[in-house]
Every structure is written in structure tokens, then in C-alpha cells.
Image: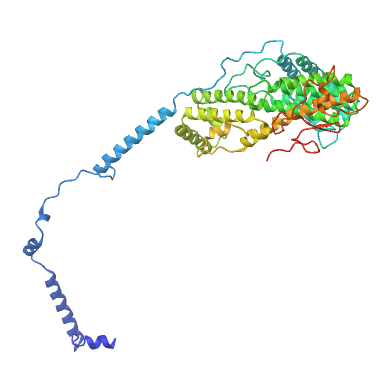
Amino acid sequence: MLKFLQKNSEEITPCASSSEWTKRVTSDEKVQDKKQVIPSTVQESVVPTASKRTLPLTRPNLFGIHWKHANRTALVTLCLATVVGGRWYVANQTPTYRLPSTERVELSRPNAAHFYSIAADSLTVQEWRNVDNLYANSPTTRAARGNVTEIRQALPQYATALTWLRQGFEQEYRGQHTNWMKTVPTNNLSKPVPDYIVMRCMARLLAIESQALAAEGKTAQALSSAIDAIHFGQDIIRGEQTLTEGMIGTLAVGIGTEEATNILRTSPSLSSASTRPLTARLENLIAREGTFGDILRAEQSFGNGTLQEMFNVRPEASMNLLGSGSLNPLESIGTQLAYTGTVFVMGKQGIVDRYNHRMDTYVTQTNLPYAVGSQQIAKKPQQLFLAPIEEILIPNMKRAYWSFTVKQAQKRVILAQLAVEAYKSDHNGTSPKTLSALTEGAVPYLKTVPTDPFSPTGQDPLRYQNGRVSSVGANEQGRYLEPD
């Protein structure tokens, strides 16, 4: 501060009084104002000549956008609208579907399906559901050990239904569907859904009848009822309508195989005379069984029919197909946006082609031996954009394929074990050395040795040791391990 004062001491002049200080400040301000005033003539001389030119009038702005920019925006908008409209037009072109070559017709009569329908209508839905309670309390199928007496008392109520079912077993199952509980089916979203609960209860009714007969010591008749459940399940599978019906049929087959396995494990030895008819019947059922690929082909046709109706007949049905059954408007809007975006990006034909390509791939994989096909199904497709519609239509193939293969193996194990029991009855309780011995002799017990679908090639014979038959897909307790 001292240095500043020393440096500027010459510029600072002390004032004698405050009035003198005021006069000096006022005079200084006037001098400063005079310095800032510039004559107008001087201003005109210093202004450049170019600034005197008159600027052109500009066009008014359009919504805050300069007219030149508005023209450019309109052009870009027009181009985008043309591109989007053209893409939407192309995406909505009618695709080519894979549908059955012949129209589905009503089943001819007499037919097994006709008798199944009468059996289903002979009881109310509630009476059929009471079968579930008896089955849950049965002594062999659940952890809870119930009383067989309750089953015996209830069976007379179902005698008529059992009679109609067995009349159906005597008939050939013809036709391409099992929708015999409703009306003539169609391949679309309007198809009336069969009552799957009644189908399951029919198989369970045969199972509890088998349990009651086994408790009475009627082993051969008990096994016959179990094979009836297998027969009924195979007929449902042969309906070839949807994968859902195929898996319901597989469930019914499993109900029958479970009962037959329990009987063979706990019942005394069987005579050859009572076992041979059962062996012949089960061998015939196995010879007529289809493959999992057959079920997928039927599902593929149904899926194409569903897509056809969704795209062409009932576009609003896409909401239900994608699971938007809620009344929440935001959820419905989101689902519709997802559907619209999928159609816009992939196109209707693209969605159909991708669905068919995926189903073709699954059919090819399931026609391979299970050990190979199951590994290929487990691999997820390397696709950056997966259509939501495709992911809904294509179910979890890995588990369905495994369940179907388990039932195939169980049927073959039961068949071979029945033949072993018949052989032991004819040879004083001595078991055959190999399963091949069952196909030898003047009156063989089996036409061919059953193959194991879980074997590496799918054609290797079942495992056999000390008179017991098993599959490589089962552990020592006979349980089949579910896939990871």
C-alpha cells in the first residue's frame, strides 16, 4: 500500500476542504462526458461504406423455423414417411403358410374317439374331478398312503364310463385330431379347446381301477387296466392337433406306465398264460406309436394356422396371443407396440419363415437319437433379434422331448419285463440269460428285443441283469433324471 501511494503521489493533489473536492469531481465528470461526445459528421465518416447497404427482407419463420430450414425438414419428413409406408406395405403382404393339404373332416364312426366322447359325457366335470382325489390318495402313486377301500366303493359310479372306454379300445382310432369332446376343430385361435382335465381323469380312472385290482390279487387284470391307460394316452398323441394334446397324451401314458411298473415290482410272479396276451398287446401299441417329430409337425401346422388367422382374419387376436389378457391399458399398448414393431422389422412372411425354420430344426433334431438330439435342442439360436411371437409359439422343446422319451423307455422296459416273467413261468423260475433268448423258440415271447431310446445310438438293446430290465436313462432306483 505504501509503494502504491509513493508511486502515485504526484497524481494525488490534496484538497483543502470537502467543497473543493466536490467541485473537482464535478468538473472531471464534465470533461469525461465531452470526451465521449462525437459529432454526427464524424460518426458518418468512420462508419464503413458496406454497412450503409440495405439488408434484404427475410421471409417469416414457420413455427420458429427459418423458411429455408422448414423446406429441408419437410423434404426429410416426406422421405421418411415414404420409406416407413413402403416398409409397412411390404411387411404386411400376405405370407405363404404351411397348412395341411386336406381339410379336416369329422371322424368316421364307429371310431375309438366316438366312444371316448360318450365316456366323457357319461359323467359331469365334477364327478370326473373326484377321480383326482381318489388318485391322490391312492396307495401306490403318492407319498400319502390311502385306503383302497375308498377306491373300491367309488368304482361302481364309474362303471359306465369304463365300459365305453373299453369299447373304444376295440376300435381303430382314425382321424387327425382328438377334439372329440367339442365340435369339429379348426386350425386357428377360435378352435374349441378340449377338456384336458377330463382326459387326464380318464387315464387316472383306469389307474385307480388297476390299483384296486392289484390289491385284490388280480395282477393280470391290474396290468391290463394299466395298459388301457397307455392305450388311451397313445390315442390322444395320435390325434396330432397340437403339442399340448401330445403332452396330455404323454401324461396319460405315464400314468399307465407308472402303475404297471409298480405292479411288476411288488406283485408275485405271473403265469405265462396270463402274461403273453399282455405282452402281445403292449408290443402292438409300441409298434404303432409315433415319434416326437410327428407331434411337432402337427404343432407346426397348427402354428401356421394360428399365424394366418392372427395376421389376416383377427388382427386383434394378437393381443391375446401375446398374453395381454389384462385390462390394463398400458400393458395392452405396450403389447401392441411390441407386435407392431416385430411385424415392421421382420414382416409377416419373415415371422412365418422363422417359425417354420425353427420348427423344421426341432423336427430334424428330435429324429436323431436322444443322446444327440437333446444336446442340439439345448443350444439356443444365435440371433440378435428374436420375435416375441416366435418365442411364445415355440415351447420348451427340451423338457417336452425328454418327457416323451421317458415314456417310450418305460413302455419298452415293461414289455421286456413282462416277457421275462413269462419266460420264468415256463422255465421253473429261471430267468433268461439274455434278452435275445426271448425272441427264440417255436413260440417266442417277443418279436424283437426292445431298444433303449436313451442309448447312444437309440437302437441299442435295453440293459438286462439278474432278471431285471432297465434303461440307461434311469438310475439304480429306476428313476429318470430330468434334464438340466
Q: Nearer the viewer, residue 476 or 321?
A: 476
| Residue 118 visible in the picture | yes
* Residue 125 falls left or right of residue 385: right
What percent of the width, then of the height, locates residue 480? 75, 36
Determine whether 317 is above or below 338 in the image. Answer: above
- Which residue shows up at 53% across the image and 23% down it? 309
Residue found at the far top of this picture: 109
Question: What colour scheme does the image use?
Answer: rainbow
* Residue 211 falls left or right of residue 298: right
* Residue 372 falls left or right of residue 131: left
- Which residue shows up at 47% across the image and 35% down it? 341
Determine whether 54 is above or below 134 in the image. Answer: below
Residue found at the far right of this picture: 428
What percent of the width, then of the height, locates residue 483? 69, 38
Q: Nearer the viewer, residue 425 or 217?
A: 425
What percent of the width, then of the height, locates residue 290? 68, 22
- From the image, which quarter does the N terminus lie in? bottom left
| Residue 207 visible in the picture | no
Q: Nearer the viewer, residue 128 or 472?
A: 472
* Residue 441 falls left or right of residue 385: right
What percent of the width, then of the height, locates residue 317? 53, 27
Determine whether 286 is above or below 144 in the image. Answer: above
- From the image, which quarter does the C terminus lie in? top right
- Number of numbered tags placed on the structure image: 0
